[in-house]
């Protein structure tokens, strides 16, 4: 399996939401939060990358915008994986157990 390392953090779903959907359509955070049934503060935190977009809210975003839940969950998963790998690089396990290939 081929893997590659990202050199920069993936774009968070909140930034994509703001730049690709809300700004171009002139939708305010307040009105979009009302459509989602969440608080303006929580949506603002997501848009400004201070909070994660959980799968339940991702499904609501998808329903309101006519996109797929997988899009929003995938964007958040990319950010989560990048952040986890960055933390794991600094962590040293006390022991490792590697699988040895049979000859």
Image (cartoon, grey):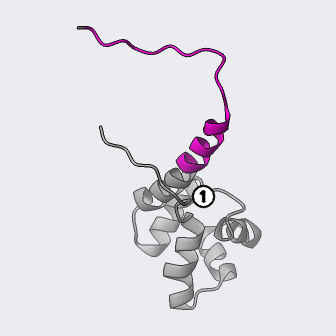
**Location of residue 3 in the rendering, given as x and y in whole percent from the top left corner:** 37, 44
Q: In this view, does 13 lie to the left or right of 90?
A: left
Q: Residue at x 67, y 64 (%)?
A: 49
Q: Which residue is drawn at 72% across and 66% down?
A: 45
- The C terminus, quarter of image: top left
Q: In this view, does 96 lie to the left or right of 49?
A: left
Q: Residue at x 48, y 54 (%)?
A: 6
State the residue in front, 51 or 63.
51
| Extreme residue in the front direction | 103
The image quadrant of residue 35 is bottom right
Q: In this view, does 103 lie to the left or right of 3?
A: left
| Extreme residue in the right direction | 41
| Extreme residue in the top direction | 103
**Magenta-highlighted residues:** 80-102
**Location of residue 81 in the rendering, given as x and y in whole percent from the top left corner:** 53, 46
- The N terminus, quarter of image: top left
What residue does disc 1 label?
A: 53
Q: Is residue 71 above or below residue 82?
A: below
Query: Within the magenta stretch, is there residue 87?
Result: yes
Q: Is mark 1 on a helix, strand or loop?
A: loop
Q: Which residue is drawn at 61% across and 77% down?
A: 32
Q: How many labels does the image show?
A: 1
**Location of residue 10 in the rendering, given as x and y in whole percent from the top left corner:** 52, 61
State the residue in front, 27 or 35.
27
Q: Is residue 8 above or below residue 48?
A: above
């Amino acid at each position: 399996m081929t893997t590659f390392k990202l050199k920069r953090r993936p774009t968070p779903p909140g930034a994509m939401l703001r730049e690709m959907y809300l700004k171009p359509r002139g939708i305010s955070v307040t009105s979009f939060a009302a459509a989602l049934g969440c608080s303006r503060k929580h949506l603002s935190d997501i848009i400004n990358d201070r909070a994660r977009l959980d799968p339940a809210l991702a499904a609501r975003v998808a329903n309101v915008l006519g996109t797929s839940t997988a899009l929003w969950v995938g964007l958040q998963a990319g950010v989560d994986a990048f952040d986890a790998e960055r933390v794991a690089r600094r962590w040293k396990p006390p022991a490792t157990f590697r699988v040895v290939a049979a000859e």
